[in-house]
Image (cartoon, grey):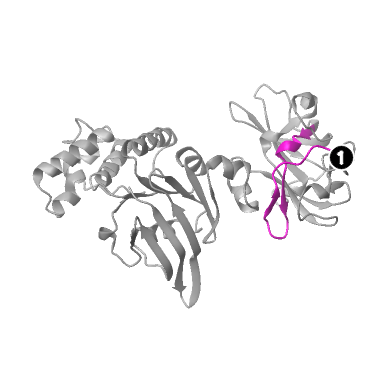
Amino acid sequence: MASVRLEHVTKRYDDQGEIVTAVDDMNLDIDHGEFICFVGPSGCGKSTTMETIAGLTIPTEGEIHIGDREVTNLPPKDRGIAMVFQNIALFPHMDVYDNISFGLRLRDYPQDEIDRRVERASEIVQLEGMLDRMPDEMSGGQRQRVAIARAIVREPDVFLMDEPLANLDAKLKVHMRTELQRLHKELDTTIIYVTHDQEEAMTLSDRIAVLNSGSLQQIDPPLTCYNEPDNLFVAGFIGSPSMNFVSGTVSENSIDTSNFSLAFDPSTVDGVGVGDEVTIGIRPEDIYPAEHRNEVADATASIAAKVDILEPMGDEIFAYMKLDETETSMDQELTTDNQLLMSIEPDSEYEEEDDIEVVIDRRNIHLFDTGTGEALVHKLQPIGAGGGAAGSEVESDD
């Protein structure tokens, strides 16, 4: 296994005379044996970043190090890496043994060494007894394990996986995620994994690298990205359903939005002053019906709303709520400032169009600078903690 280090890696393309920056000044340190997920929306640069590590793309600027070697201009075969792609690409006329051993045979490895490596790889991915099968005789998950075994036999320093589960059905994805976690423990090697599926990223990785528009937004353990996002993009991207965002203005003792106010002492947060525009971030699970106020350690005042849409999910219900009387249609949607999404118990008896009052857990309210998008604070202090906050929450607007 080996560490991976990217130093100021930039990749630009000429797209019909227009210069497009796919990766922008990427600096990244990946430790020995880490499982790192690159996650972000389509076109964010995650696959291009992996391709520069693999040697499939040469960066316009910067350096790439694998272990103690600079490999920026080395071909893929000399980098000590192995890749697993979304497209499994097995040879249909070869059995499992020949598919797994193909690369070794091309490199003229001795037959006993090929047999040893294929046997070990097949045990790791649980393909014992299937080496004489043809690809069309196997399930999608089994074929994906063949592709992974084909990478394992190379005994690489680093595994690179580019959305390897994207073509599998939901049940098989869950199973293969477990297989990949077991594989990581078994091999004790460095894995870099590209996905647009944040659930995969949250469950698989030691750290998540969140990318947007070619830039690294945050790299931290999954729960840190979830609970302490560095900026509005990470806060909105990590978490399903997404975080609620409401625009507000800081006053002397509150943050005022178009539909409610939160008691707030600006002196408790560095860099925040009266008149500043901020964005309030609230996870759906941190909003509660007002009758459950006693279950919340530090609840805000009640906020009046109307239930708009209910989405039963089995173990919970997602309740979309309107904060004003805005009428919506196919041509006019609710904005983030006049709606909230709340997660409630599956046995809740609310119905669409019901009037409801909700409270928010202040301990999990996030504040972001509206202009820069950078996080300001991830927990509002209790009322009075800064010496100047109002003695009680400011009531919601009627």
Query: Which residue is the extreme one toward the top?
Result: 347
Measured as percent of width and height from the top left, residue 288 is found at 74, 31
The amino acid on which the numbered mark 1 sits, given as a three-letter code, is Ser
Percent coordinates x, y for residue 56 in the rendering: 34, 62
**Residue matched to label 1:** 396
Is residue 146 covered in magenta?
no
Residue 338 percent location from the top left of the image: 77, 46
Tally of numbered discs = 1
Q: Is 55 on the left or on the right of 333, as rendered?
A: left
- Where is residue 302 drawn, in percent x and y? 83, 34
> 349 or 29: nearer the eye?
29
Over which residues does the magenta segment extend? 358-383
| Rendered position, 344 above or below 58 | above
Q: Is residue 256 visible?
A: no
> Residue at image x 77%, y 40%?
381
- Quadrant showing the C terminus: top right
